[in-house]
Amino acid sequence: EAQVTQNPRYLITVTGKKLTVTCSQNMNHEYMSWYRQDPGLGLRQIYYSMNVEVTDKGDVPEGYKVSRKEKRNFPLILESPSPNQTSLYFCASRSRGEKLFFGSGTQLSVL
Amino acid sequence: AQSVTQLGSHVSVSEGALVLLRCNYSSSVPPYLFWYVQYPNQGLQLLLKYTSAATLVKGINGFEAEFKKSETSFHLTKPSAHMSDAAEYFCAVSGRSGGGADGLTFGKGTHLIIQP
């Protein structure tokens, strides 16, 4: 089954403790992206990747890092999380011209 | 730069009534436009997309949207609302390349409430 898999589904952490949210897709998509969703703000793009080793900043990249060492994986790294990064995060992928496939989301709380 | 404005953060309609969710966009290049739906505790699902073919686009679950260039609008409609339509709806425009290859710029969303 074609899917985008994010882990974990829920995460509670404390300020400053490094964390990684994983994202994997099994559709051989070139393009992958991370979004955060906040009430009243909709979805905002954090980072995206056009292919392996090719990443670029989205609209709200501050405080986040990504890497794309393999085509299927696109982890989101928070080196020193802060409470304003409490949010619902979505990973998405697609091939050129196709629709975006979204993961089920990761609800992150930073205390 | 591209942007999307969704008018109304909450829209309430009666079951069986017409659903109209408004979306206006700005784009310096011919846009690709999308409507996504998000059910509670789920990710986003594509309802329909406009990619410069027919201006009236039909999607899943009886939804359709009409691209009106003169009004820079892409409103979503459904003739008769069903209780299962209650969800968050997002309008989106294609990203920096203008060709649909990049990410999407989303509106802030409209929460659709269906009254019995």
Image (spheres, coloured by chain):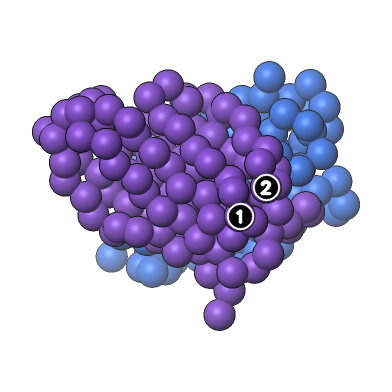
Chain colours: A purple, B blue
Graded by Cα atoms within 10 Å as few (under 14), some (14 to 19) or many (20 or more), the crowding at tag 1 reads few
In the image: residue A21, left or right of residue A82? right
Instruction: Please tell me in which quadrant of the rendered image residue A62 appears.
Output: top left
> Picture coordinates of residue B60 (x, y %)?
61, 68
Q: Which residue is drawn at 68% across and 38% down?
A: A54
Q: Which sits in the foreground, B93 or A12?
A: A12
Q: Which residue lies furthest to the bottom in this view?
A: A1
**Is B42 located above or below residue A86 in the figure?**
below
Residue underneath mark 1 = A70
Q: Which sits in the foreground, B80 or B106?
A: B106
Residue underneath mark 2 = A52
For mark 1, give the secondary structure: loop
**Amino acid on which disc 1 is placed:** Glu
Position of the C terminus of chain A, as image quadrant, is top left
Q: Residue furthest right?
A: B53
For mark 2, give the secondary structure: loop
Instruction: Please tell me in which quadrant of the rendered image residue B4 appears.
Output: top right
> Picture coordinates of residue A2 (x, y %)?
58, 74
What chain letter is assigned to the residue under label 2? A
Q: Can residue B64 be seen in this view?
A: no
Q: Is residue B32 visible?
A: yes
Q: Which sits in the foreground, B111 or A2?
A: A2
Of callouts 1 and 2, the N-terminal one: 2
Q: Are marks 1 and 2 in contact (CB under 8 Å)?
A: yes
Tag 1 and tag 2 share a subunit: yes
Q: Residue at x 79, y 33 (%)?
A: B98
Q: Which residue is drawn at 78% across and 53% down?
A: A97
Q: Which residue is drawn at 20% across and 28% down?
A: A16
